[in-house]
Amino acid sequence: MRYLPLTDADRGEMLSVIGAPDVDALFTDVPAAHYLKEPIEGLPLHASEMAVEKHMRRLSKKNLAAADAAFFCGAGAYRHHVPATVDHLIQRGEFLTAYTPYQPEIAQGTLQMLFEFQSQVARLYGCAVANASMYDGSTACWEAVAMAARVTRKKRVVLSGALHPHYAETVRTMAKFTEDEIAGALPTMQGAPDIDGLIARIDEATSCVVVQYPDILGRVYDMTPIAEAAHAKGALLIAVNTEPVALGACRSPGEMGADIVVGEGQSLGVGLQFGGPYLGLFAVRDPKHVRQMPGRLCGETVDAEGKRGFVLTLSTREQHIRREKATSNICTNSGLCALAFTIHLTLLGEKGLRALAAENHRLACVAADRLAEVPGVTVLNDSFFNEFTIVLPTDARAVVRTLAERKVLAGVSLGRLYPGNDDLSGGLIVAVTETSTEEDIATLCSALKEVLA
Amino acid sequence: MNAPNKSGWKPEMTPDTAAAVPTATGNRALMLEEPLIFEIGGSETTGVDLPEPSEGANRLGGMARTEPFGLPGLSEPETVRHYTRLSRQNYAIDLGLFPLGSCTMKHNPRLNEKVARMPGFADVHPLQPVDTVRGALEVINELAHWLIELTGMHGVAMTPKAGAHGELCGILCIRAALEAKGDARKVILVPESAHGTNPATAAFAGYAVEDIPATPEGRVDLEALKARLGPDVAGVMITNPNTCGLFERDMKAISDAVHAAGGYVYCDGANFNAIVGRVRPGDLGVDAMHINLHKTFSTPHGGGGPGSGPVVLSEALAPYGPLPFTARRPDGTVDLIEEENAGEEHPLSFGRMSAFHGQMGMFTRALAYILSHGADGLRQVSGDAVLNANYLLRSLEDVLDAPFAFSGPCMHEALFSDRGFADGLTTLDLAKGMIDEGFHPMTMYFPLVVHGSMLVEPTETESKAGLDQLVVALRSLAERARAGDMSLKNAPIHAPRRRLDETLAARKPVLAWSEPDVPAGHPTRSEQGGS
């Protein structure tokens, strides 16, 4: 077998050093009744590299890749052009095949990268400190809710109706077990989010208010009044961002008073990958909250010769030290996705991020205007970045399926995200990035026109 | 002792006279110092060609970002060089033996990387219509089938994103199953030797955590466990093979006792690599077990993730598993069961643990690895992993104390203690000495049940010649530690950095870069730190 270097001669020599007659004899602690003496029946035997590649290619061909369609899906996962440099660099074996940097003397590459990553995320979010990553945006959102309970010692969580429903579900699932009380809602189908309605739901028992920015329907709005209302009741504002490119054009959540900013970093460097692995971003505005943060933190220090170096730090918050008293049970996070993110953001820099955001917004404006001209289509949003919601006179789920047969992936229907809510079933979230061409937009509009006619 | 390689060739070592000669740059030939991107990049530099933004109207609702936010950019060549230089300061499995116990640092086949990047997997959106992603769903379903068959379990939850997330999934299934019976239990029993994630998970899920005592030979004390079981115990979390590197012989009896007391058995599958293809946890009465795809099934560790932690479930727990999941229909097509259609098919689910459908990029890699090995190859994997570990154990036990070696063969990892080291020398010193010898250190000070523990897991992808080199290095270091060679206190001396001041890092945390605003004559950060 090509991944196993031992030869039969090696095995024989090693067994004689051990003093065992054969490999089975090393498993004497396994009760005989439960020890399998032969390969498990009914499963295929080993296969060549060529055969495995062929099998996997056959499966991959059954999927419609975004590049082969007019593509407008978003709702928490966005297709951006990832420079070839990113994928080349993350495949360097010294990054790809390293472990969590527990031995800092021989892990400065990963540690410095993480320090740079944390610094970039903090600046992007308008925060003081970011951690070294979480699994994804939805689990980062849940961890932020748990952190807010630790900070405020309160248990009532107010979720905005315009928070991604998968994120809301994740919070709801976890809260069943921590016995937090979750107050949720559905999105209001209006041009602007219902901020007054949200503020009215905050009370003295509230630990945190969770909002999304831009929200699930793509709306961009000022979070300052929500932050002020939350703070007045002793609650924290948690801002969730699922599209970091938006922050190249829009004000940061931190500067509007969000206390914890979390999000999905997949847009930069990571790619769609059918939903994972992605990259959870987690930051706090106030440095005094650092010791309540979950996850790994990389910090600067010096070595025995006084040279600058980096280490994982403040680990007394973490499970391998604190065990049942840890701030989170997270261990492995998204190191390699963080590397892809930081390389992509370094390639962009501030200038490139602004230009990328501007191009996304320009194309989204073009798409919104053209779609508004399609009979039967209404554009819901007063404001948006690169994603907005249109309302169709029929169930958008069926329209999306019909358009997919024509290789038009028109977006994500609200019916799929909010099953059982007929009021929302006409809604379709359309995302437009720099990878969508004006020709793609024309294809979408004409296909939609035909289907709705 | 064995020669360090098959041919017997050994590099000549000359006295290191160069170390004292400073260079103007701080570089030393191939060892290049690299500043931070914030120190070399600029706000007007970019490595990506994009159209110049046009000024004018926008629809950002008055929320346009006007202030600079201080993100440095580098050109493409500078970017390549920056990260290439950083990469060279890392140790990695591609460079050498990485015997980090419990972490299963095995070779990462590049076929897996190629497969994961096929556009039909890498360039599909999780919320595309199901008819456009049937192949992706088939991958998930095919991998799920393998995991079920390899573990002898009833079902599998594929969405957990890493081992600890999988633990949470399993414990939530247990809690949901008990609540469905109206049986609110409050305690989870966890052995002292468990991974830190186990007690953290149980506490996170709202349980009180109590220790299970161990026998002197390093296994769960069955009689003590039985005595503690009762109507308040929701379940046990047991690692098998355990973190002392031993198989829990009484696993079936433990499961039977826990079940008889109305509880459930969670098995931490971090060490599944030792038994894959030879023992099915389902046969031992396990109700839930996570499988770290980044350990047993070779998806790369990536400097700390991403992982993937599918959880295999018994018939009793499977109905409570999270959404979404895949189901193969009688006609062979694979469907996605999510909120929209779960009502009829999976009404007892405890809910959703994360957005979307799991770590697809890890599923493709793990499936390619599993198909490459097949049922026969996977059995050889555990055989070679255990053979390599026992070879190390027997090649070292005369110079390193092996507290449980008397009780028989180890599984895939060998456990040593610092007994016999001269006063003043510790496990940390020996581990740092390994760095100078060109190896990644073993897991240190874990499990907690052994003093100064050193947990060595070679994995099956190491050659005998590679193991012999490790033995030469470890024997030399062990002898130095026993003889009181205090020069080990200075190790490592050949790494990119000497020992780092972790106390300073924690006491005065610097967790993000900030522009230096220190006036001339004021001590620099590194001078403060060095004092």
Image (cartoon, rainbow, N blue to C red):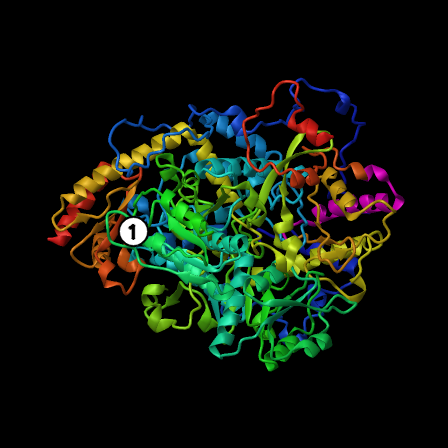
Horizontal relation, residue B70 to residue A367: left or right: right
Give the residue at x 58% y 67%: B207
Is disc 1 placed on a helix, strand or loop? loop
Q: Establish if B274 lies above or below B305.
A: below
Q: Quadrant of residue B87?
A: top right
Q: Which residue is mark 1?
A: A194
Residue B478 is covered by the magenta coloring:
yes
Percent across and percent down for residue B238 are 64, 67
Q: Quadrant of the C terminus of chain B?
A: top right
Q: Please state which of residues A259 and B191 is positioned toward the viewer in this rendering.
A: A259
Q: Is residue B316 above or below residue B47?
A: below
Instruction: Say which of B490 and A220 sits in front.
Output: A220
The x, y position of residue A189, in whole percent, is 24, 53
> Looking at the image, can residue A52 be seen?
no
The boundaries of the magenta stretch are: B460-488
Give the residue drawn at x 57%, y 59%. Answer: B377
Q: Residues within 10 Å of mark 1 (few under 14, many from 20)?
A: some
Magenta: main secondary structure equals: helix
Q: Position of residue B292 (x, y in %)?
A: 55, 57
